Amino acid sequence: MQLFYIAHIDNDKAILKEEEARHVKVLRKNINDQLHLIDGNGYLYEALISGIIDTKKANEVHLEIISKTLQARNRNYHFHLFIAPTKQNERVEWMLEKAIETGLDAITFIQTEHSEKSRVNMGRLEKICISAMKQSGEFYKPVINDLVLLKDVLKKNTESLQLIAHCNTRFEKQSLQAYSASLSTKHIQIFIGPEGDFSENEINVAYTMGYKGLSLGTTRLRTETAGLYAAMGLSALLGNSH
C-alpha cells in the first residue's frame, strides 16, 4: 500500500504539498484516483483526488476524505532513545531511519561532556522520520526532540525502565536480556553516549538517580550502531508485529 503523509486534515478535506504532491505526480495519479493517507497519530485515511495544481508557483493535490480508521499499534511497548548526535550527519540519519523501521517511539538528542556535535538538523531528521514511517507501514510518527543537555533529562521516572549504556568497567552493567523481567513496564528509556562515551561523572550521576547500566556486548560499538542495536534488541525481546 502506497502511503502519503499529511499532518492536518480539515473538514474531510486535505491538501498534499511539496514532496508528497510530487510523489503523486511521479505515480501519474489523476482526478478521482484513490490515495491512502496517514497523519502520524494512528489514523489511516482513504481519499479521492479532487484537484491537482502543478504550476511554477504551486504544487498541490487536493483531496476529499472518504474514510478514517484508527490502526492498532505494531508493538506493545514504548521505546524512547536518548542519544548523542554523531559528528557526521549521515551516520545518525542512517540510525534514525533503521531504528524507526525496527521500532522507535521517541528520540531525544543529548549533549554530553564528551560530545563533538552541538546541533542537529531537525528539518532533515523530520523528513527522514516521515519517509521511514511510510516505508515501514507505521501509523504512529515517532517524536523527535532537539538537542538538550544530558543533565536536563537525567530525571528519575518510576514508571520507566531507565538504562544507560557505557563502556566504563568500574560500574556494574547488564545485557538487555538480563533486564527482561523488568521490561514488563513496557516503557523503556535507553541512553547512548558519544564516541568518547559518557564521562565517569555522568555515569555516576545517572546511577545515583536509579538508572541501570546497560552492556551492548563485548565489542566497542559506534554511537549509531549502539542506538540501532538497542532498538533491535528490544524488538527481539518484546516482540514486534512488523
Image: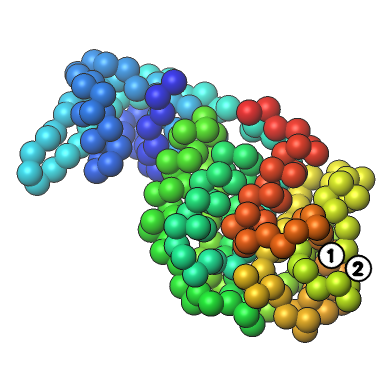
Residue 43 appears in the rendering: no
State the residue position of label 1. Answer: 213
Which one is in front, 162 or 165? 165
Which one is in front, 2 or 42? 2
Q: Residue at x 59, y 57 (%)?
A: 224
Residue 200 appears in the rendering: yes
Find out whether the residues at labels 2 and 1 contact each other: C-beta distance under 8 Å.
yes
Q: Residue furthest front?
A: 219
Q: Secondary structure at mark 1?
A: strand
The circle on residue 172 is 2
Q: In the rendered view, would you say 7 is above or below 221? A: above
Q: Residue at x 78, y 81 (%)?
A: 200
Q: Residue at x 52, y 33 (%)?
A: 136
Q: Position of residue 242 (x, y in %)?
A: 63, 28
Q: Position of residue 50 (x, y in %)?
A: 21, 23
Q: Quadrant of residue 205?
A: bottom right
The amino acid beneath tag 1 is: Gly
